[in-house]
Image (cartoon, grey):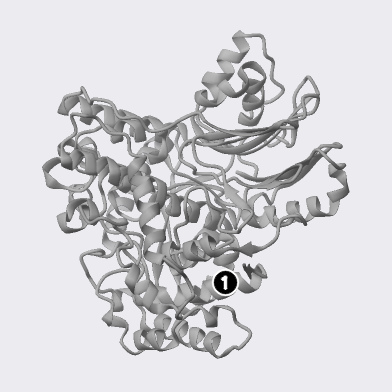
Amino acid sequence: MCGIGGFVDYEHDARRYAAAAKRMQRSLTPRGPDAAGDYQDEDAVLVHRRLIVIDPDGGSQPMCAPDENTVLVYNGELYNTEEIRKDLLARGHTFRGHSDTEVLLHAFLEWDTDAFARLNGIFAFAIWQKKERRLVLCRDRLGVKPLFVAHLQDGIVFGSTVGAVLCHPAVEPEVDEDGLRAVLLLGPARPPASGVFRQVDSLLPGHYAVLTPEGYADRTYWKLEAHEHTDDLETTIARTHELICDAAQRQLVSDVPLACFLSGGLDSSILSMLAAKTYAARGETLHTWSVDYRDNDKYFTKNSFQPNSDNEFIQMMVDALGTKHHNVVIEPDALCAALLPATDARDLPGMADVDSSLLLFCAAVKQGGTTVCLSGECADELFGGYPWYHREEILFEDTFPWSRSVDLRLGLLAPGIVRDGAEFVREHYLATCRRAEKLPSDSAKDARMREMFVLNLDWFMATLLDRKDRMSMYSGLEVRVPFCDHRIVEYAYNMPWDFKALEGREKGIVRRAFAHELPEEIVVRKKSPYPKTFHPAYTRLCADYVRRIFEDSDSIAAHLFNHAAVEALMEKPESLAEPWYGQLMRTPQIFAYIIQIDRWLRQYKVRLV
């Protein structure tokens, strides 16, 4: 993976912002620690930082086409590189190396923007055509790789991160009312097209954009469509198995060391099993990694959202697969301290210690000699893994199911900080529901399940993917997510709920598909989310940090919150009955989120307008 950035200026010589380009490139260094490159002409500047995964010698960027007119900067991986290469060779193209970057560049030369629908992968890229003065931006179908833009009077700024875009002097670190409401009432999620900062937008997944001197056009090359599911149950089981296996197999290609994240849950166990088989066939041993917290065996508390801990299930899979396993144990003080760099990595307040723990975990994996990992994200969103799919009182509740209480959030804010908060949240919720394409034959429950699918895809899954990309790439670690293959997403969207929740279980169809390849205890294990700490020391550390923020007269964050309401939570942390976001974020994570808001406001010198 890599980091990309750049800008186009049709009115002035773009090279006058050479210093900004250098700042942009430096800001992207964690995403690409192995190499750097840039391209400049009078209209455009492109910068690149590279994490070498495929073709160390032949994949350097920016990559210029044989016509010396077309230049590409690319962040991502293509998983159907060889199929596209074969087609291009038949059409007369020649290649200098074996990188997917070169294949992507030639695909664009052959098919222009029609090439994008042919791609299977995770990517965000920019293509500059010098003679035509034309910039093309594109992002993968599910938004696994980020791409942000800021429109200028005579051009555009783009980058893999908001921080890179803010390096341009014409882009100000200003947050308006909508941005503040997003952080305080929707966070750690953000609206799909929003970069939170006033001038910054996110290119939507499945979209590409074209900039010329005549204007800017944003277009869709992929979207979810509703179709009748015509496969019977046995065919659906077989097809689900086939799609998951194919996606995983494609994503095992790497010229650098590759491992798997292993939690002992269904999804990571499937991917680890498939990878271990491939490695064993060539006489190699797969490495697996897991995360835990000091004294979690002592403090872990079962609840309906987190029914059991991972350790015994991890060991069960390690024994079954014969992997070389590594366990990373995180200390409470390190977890709290890492809230700050985790905010920097995301460019925004994030999922509190759910982020900071992953940041520390990924750093340890990278230091252990691994550059690429497979991870099980997205199966829960696609196959009904979360409690809100199965609890009727939540399923049909007319709000975001993972963040149900706007009143809780408003009650923690100082009076007058936001206006029309409930209406703001509701409109985003309703707009998402309207995007869910349905069939006339859908029952009320089927129609609602389609809405839930899109809600999860556009918001909850997007937040988790953003987390995974930012926390991993901050240490130069590439994490691949095979369940995000668009073919799996399309198939799951149209699968009947009674198939998907076979035998009344979350991800029932996936359990059945792999029932004979995994230990029975793994197949029947109840869904348990990413592990978190239950250590009371962590809660105390975060609460004390928040008190220091509230005592600082220079802290903007201190003026955003109702100190008495937050203090009441400090006195009775257990008073919060259910998570305020997702399955993991309870009272300690509220304190951690306030810490991240404070860090973000200070670090980015945010101006509230």
Q: Percent position (x, y) of residue 460? A: 38, 53
Residue at 15 percent across and 40 percent down: it is: 502
Q: Secondary structure at mark 1?
A: helix
**Above or below, comparing residue 347 to residue 382 in the picture:** below
49 relative to 591 in the view: left or right? right
Q: Percent position (x, y) of residue 344? A: 60, 64
Q: Is residue 257 visible?
A: yes
Mark 1: which amino acid? Leu
Q: Is residue 456 visible?
A: no
161 relative to 465 in the view: left or right? right
Q: Percent position (x, y) of residue 581? A: 35, 64
**Above or below, comparing residue 137 to residue 376 in the picture:** above
Quadrant placement of the N terminus: top right
411 relative to 515 in the view: left or right? right
Quadrant placement of the C terminus: bottom right
| Residues packed near mark 1 inside 10 Å, few (<14), some (14 to 19) or many (20 plus) | many
Q: Which residue is mark 1?
A: 340
Image label count: 1
Q: Percent position (x, y) of residue 102? A: 66, 27
Residue at 15 percent across and 38 percent down: it is: 498
Front residue of 592/15: it is 15
**Above or below, comparing residue 411 to residue 199 in the picture:** below
Q: Quadrant of residue 212?
A: top right
Front residue of 482/410: it is 410
Residue at 59 percent across and 69 percent down: it is: 600
Front residue of 36/185: it is 185
Furthest-left residue in this view: 503
Residue at 56 percent across and 15 percent down: it is: 86
